[in-house]
Amino acid sequence: MGKDTMTAEERLVATIKLEPVDRVVCAPETGNYAGQYVGMTNREFVWEFATKGLSAVGKLADDYPLWDSSADINGITSGYVAERAGMGKMKLPGKELPDNASSQVLETEVMSRDDYTIVTDNGYGEYWLTFLERANGIGRDEVLKGIAEAGRIRAAELAAIRRRGQAPLYGDLGGLVPFDAFSLTRSIEKYYKDMFQITDRLEALMPILVDAFVEGSEKTVAATGVNRVFVGGSRSAGQFIAPKYFDRLVWPYLKDLVEKLAARNIVPILHFDCDWTKNLEYFLELPQGKFVLALDGATDIFRAKEVLSGHCAIHGDVPAAYLTVASPAELDEYCHKLIKTVGKGGGFLYACGCCMPMNARPENVNVFFKAVEKYGYY
């Protein structure tokens, strides 16, 4: 068994910079699993997160002390916030859904094509606030209350992470791949039609989004004291977007965003769901050692290691199926392969794909965490 010789923050910073470390960083997003782990309903976890939810996460961390970097970010998904300033129109446990159901985001067209003028006239921030008003059927004052509550919960969450001796993977949300931002408001069906039918108009909007996300990231760093931010991406992956449109609408503005953040000493954690395997070579154009590519089980993480070894840190990637339906022995074998292959030479943050499934089997979660001790020391 190895022994830690670095603090969690030292290990995380060195890993991102591709420097030697004592062991792999263990950085899962545990999501709503912690509530299930301690026997509470998801309704309790979501609606009473600041008390019961944080306590449940603390219990999980106490039981698995080699979990040294928290990728959790639960403020935006807590009930009060989710129905005012979350990811859009939602169904929540204990309200529209049964007490132990997972929250759901409804894929609906809230903003019209005409509403792009809000961005050009008043900025992306006004566009997003208008979206939240319409999606949730509430006034601006309620939206702003939700945003304020999200900040309060995040501050409490960060304080708890630090008390546990963990390093937060990021301070808070820093933005999205610019291309993705409108798909959440227009619906993916309508937005892909926009991509084909009004390409020039979308192209003119992208720099506005880049600047908005850079400004938002600067505010996040100032508020949290953490120079790492969450940048989400999924609907712009090569799985969905042909190279012609990826090269025109996706990559130039993602690259610009990452470069501008790096110039401000802000590290984007690119939380990229869906399959980016076709696009891996593009990431070689981004600043070396200045970002993290976080994968969710759809992208071939072993191919990512081949392409990006020595260029950026990789975060991932035990797929959900290994935590829910695989045998403990199958999971242990995969974790061994993942840590020894993707972790070879450093630059690896060990985690589950996206977030830990709420219905993960406790015996498999145990295998997941114990693999750090068994295989993770250099």
Image: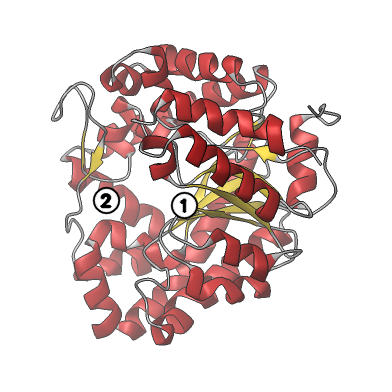
* Amino acid type of the residue tagged 1 in the rendering: Asp
Q: Which residue in the structure is indicated by mark 2?
A: 130
How crowded is the residue under tag 1: few (<14 C-alpha within 10 Å), some, or many (20+)? many
Vertical side of 179 occupied by 359: above or below: above
- Residue 145 in the figure: left or right of residue 58: left
Judged from the image, the secondary structure of the residue bearing numbered disc 2 is: helix
How crowded is the residue under tag 2: few (<14 C-alpha within 10 Å), some, or many (20+)? some
Q: Nearer the viewer, residue 303 or 217?
A: 303
Viewer-nearest of discs 2 and 1: 1
Vertical side of 23 occupied by 345: above or below: below
Tell me the residue at 49%/58% (across/down). Answer: 212
- Residue 18 in the figure: left or right of residue 228: right
Asked where in the image residue 372 lies, by quadrant, the reply is: top right
Q: Position of residue 264 (x, y in %)?
A: 71, 56
Q: Nearer the viewer, residue 1 or 330?
A: 330
How many angstroms separate mark 2 from mark 1 (CA)? 31 Å
Q: Nearer the viewer, residue 136 or 38?
A: 38
Q: Position of residue 274 (x, y in %)?
A: 40, 60
Q: How is the image coloured?
A: secondary structure
Q: Which residue in the structure is indicated by mark 1?
A: 296
Give whichever of discs 2 and 1 has the lower sequence position. 2
Can residue 218 be spotted in the picture? Answer: no
Q: Position of residue 318 (x, y in %)?
A: 50, 45
